Image (spheres, rainbow, N blue to C red):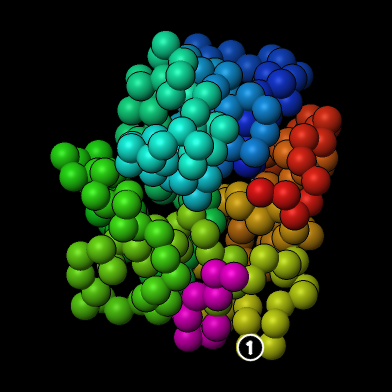
């Protein structure tokens, strides 16, 4: 059995298919872990969803911020002119409802063996066990009868620091922001969600989330995406792999083969210019 962990696909279905073909991926024996932002920005989000769903139990997909954004637009009844092209395309497909329902039931974190899969980051206060429990809280909200109300209220940058006393949407929003949007924070764990540059270009007082001294999750190797400008894939001193290598921006789609820790990459056709929405 082979296990492949792939960074942000963002609708680049052709690149994902080429990557899987290059390793002769066998869904009957191999496993594929997708680290979120499966859709949006790239040209073939619908095909990407269909491919991931078709792999069944062989594929574990983590939710990212772009996935949540498209879900929110698809479920809140906005007029088509205000909805992104990706959401309109999926909604118009004959299997669109089934695909969106499948996506809504994906996890925000997944642990297998000695690895934790997330899309973005963890605040320094959280252990891996806590992170999995908090992810479950958001997953239950997404899958529950009030999921439309939750998705309508989940966006925003506050609160920006963890407090175990947080309740309701404030608590769920903070958890969601960490797992799907976080890159930088302060040494005491205050989120800096607007910062998007490379790890070496942080504003004064900010650290990559994984480099905060005393981080409670250092006992587990963490695999994440989300950060195409990170500037480095593997950070051994922190036990993290950042596998978003900017496929949609003209970089590469990257897979980590867990059994050998070998990187496999598929070149991109460059579907978006950096800075485009």
241 sits to left or right of 76: right
Locate residue 133, reporting x and y percent: 28, 56
Quarter containing the N terminus: top right
24 sits to left or right of 164: right
- Image quarter of residue 210: bottom right
Please, is residue 226 above or below residue 6 in the view? Answer: below
- Image quarter of residue 21: top right
- Image quarter of residue 128: bottom left
Locate residue 34, reporting x and y percent: 55, 36
Residues drawn in magenta: 186-194
Q: Nearer the viewer, residue 150 or 129?
A: 150
Q: Nearer the viewer, residue 183 or 95?
A: 95
* Residue in the picture at 55% in, 69% down: 193
**Residue 143 is at least partly visible in this image:** yes
Locate residue 141, reporting x and y percent: 24, 48
Label 1: few (<14), some (14–19) or many (≥20) C-alpha neighbours in 10 Å: few
* Residue in the picture at 64% in, 71% down: 195
Q: Secondary structure at mark 1?
A: loop
Please, is residue 173 above or below residue 138 in the view? Answer: below
Q: Is residue 101 magenta?
A: no
Q: To which residue does mark 1 refer?
A: 205
Please, is residue 72 above or below residue 171 in the view? Answer: above
149 sits to left or right of 184: left
**Residue 219 is at least partly visible in this image:** no
Locate residue 73, reporting x and y percent: 42, 41
* Residue in the picture at 63% in, 82% down: 206
**Magenta stretch, main secondary structure class:** loop
* Residue in the picture at 50% in, 50% down: 65
Q: Nearer the viewer, residue 54 or 277?
A: 277
């Amino acid at each position: 059995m082979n296990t492949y962990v792939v960074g942000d696909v963002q609708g680049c279905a052709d690149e994902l298919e080429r990557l899987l073909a290059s390793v002769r991926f066998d869904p009957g024996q191999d496993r594929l872990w997708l680290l979120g932002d499966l859709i949006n920005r790239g040209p073939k989000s619908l095909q990407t969803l269909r491919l991931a769903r078709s792999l069944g139990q062989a594929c574990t997909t983590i939710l990212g911020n772009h996935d949540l954004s498209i879900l929110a637009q698809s479920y809140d009844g906005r007029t088509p002119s205000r909805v992104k092209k990706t959401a309109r395309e999926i909604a118009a497909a004959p299997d669109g409802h089934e695909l969106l329902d499948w996506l809504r039931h994906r996890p925000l974190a997944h642990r297998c063996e000695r690895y934790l899969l997330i899309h973005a980051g963890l605040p320094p206060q959280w252990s891996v066990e806590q992170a999995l429990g908090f992810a479950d809280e958001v997953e239950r909200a997404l899958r529950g009868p009030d999921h439309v109300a939750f998705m309508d209220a989940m966006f925003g940058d506050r609160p920006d620091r963890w407090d175990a006393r947080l309740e309701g949407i404030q608590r769920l929003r903070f958890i969601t922001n960490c797992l799907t949007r976080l890159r930088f924070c302060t040494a005491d764990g205050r989120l800096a969600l607007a910062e998007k540059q490379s790890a070496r270009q942080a504003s004064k007082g900010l650290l990559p989330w994984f480099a905060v001294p005393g981080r409670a999750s250092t006992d587990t190797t963490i695999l994440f995406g989300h950060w195409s400008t990170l500037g480095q894939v593997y950070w051994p001193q922190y036990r993290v792999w950042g596998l978003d290598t900017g496929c949609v921006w003209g970089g590469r789609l990257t897979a980590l083969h867990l059994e050998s820790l070998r990187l496999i990459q598929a070149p991109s056709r460059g579907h978006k210019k950096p800075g485009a929405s």
